[in-house]
Amino acid sequence: MIHYKTKEEVELLRENNQLVSRTLGEIGKHIRPGVSTLEIDRIAEEFIRDHGAEPGFLGYEGFPNTLCISVNEEVVHGIPSAKRILKEGDIISVDCGTLMHGFYGDSAYTFAVGEVAPEVRKLLEVTKESLYRGVAQVKIGHRIGDISNAVQEHAEANGFSVVRELVGHGLGRNMHESPEVPNYGARGRGPLLKEGMVLCIEPMINMGTRQVVFERDGWTVRTRDRKPSAHFEFAVAVTREGADVLTTFDFIENSVH
Ligand code: MG
Ligand code: MG
């Protein structure tokens, strides 16, 4: 069942996703070679609590940390660790959630650690563009498949592949609500977009094969061929004017503070 949000509820979701955006901006200042993924996690937890929210992922279905940090061939759901030290040329997907006023925030960004190889840089750019192509399909009367197809077309046109096992989702009082928002599919299919829907659109795009492996830690998902994967996520409300993007990457990319 799809929960349609009132304008007031959309504002609470915006507050959450703006805090996620600020948290991603904050940790972006600390991402450099030599830093462990657990250090980054701690910074995020403190920042979220200092701003009056709870980490949305901590304890969610038993997840042990504030952030999902997925390095290089890890697609999503990587567990922060003191032993995982970032090095020049890595990429890290940082997925962050908050819980405040009874609603969740959920957004993700893939950061480059120092200088990365040109083909990896391209993977990051194309994945982010795929997200924006998906967002551009958000309007009343379109269907979920229009978002899915736009993401898939852009990723595959650039020679990359789309993860099928994990998908975007509705967002609200629950982290994962209906409908599912796949990153692949046919135009004109799936649920109709209606006012008050809030969706997480989150392309997970692989450089090589689309096949993934679920690691034995019960969480980490990685590419089967161990080539890199990127992940960007926005929370978006469907309005009469089109997409109302509740997340921003400005705190990361434009150093707005
Ligand atoms: Mg997420
Ligand atoms: Mg999500």
Image (cartoon, rainbow, N blue to C red):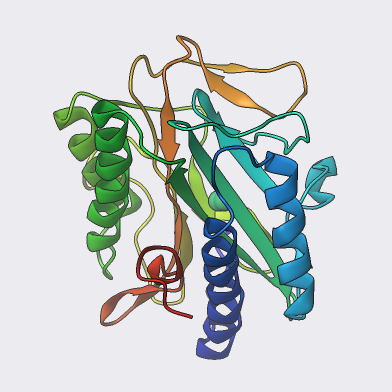
* Closest to the observer, 226 or 117: 117
Give residue 90's position: percent from left, percent from top: 47, 31
Name the residue: 29% across, 82% down: 240
Give residue 159's position: percent from left, percent from top: 19, 23
Name the residue: 28% across, 70% down: 140
- Taking the view exactly as shown, the residue that stands out farthest to the front is 34
Is residue 162 shown left or right of residue 2? Answer: left
Give residue 86's position: percent from left, percent from top: 59, 34
Residue 180 seen in this snapshot: no
Q: How many marks?
A: 0
Give residue 249's position: percent from left, percent from top: 41, 65
| Quadrant housing residue 64 | top right
Name the residue: 33% across, 23% down: 207
Is residue 140 shown left or right of residue 4? Answer: left
Residue 137 seen in this snapshot: yes
- Taking the view exactly as shown, the residue that stands out farthest to the top is 225
Name the residue: 65% across, 43% down: 68
Above-or-below relation of 240 to 69? below
Is residue 216 shown left or right of residue 25? Answer: right
- Taking the view exactly as shown, the residue that stands out farthest to the left is 157
| Quarter in which the N terminus is drawn | bottom right
* Closest to the observer, 203 or 45: 45
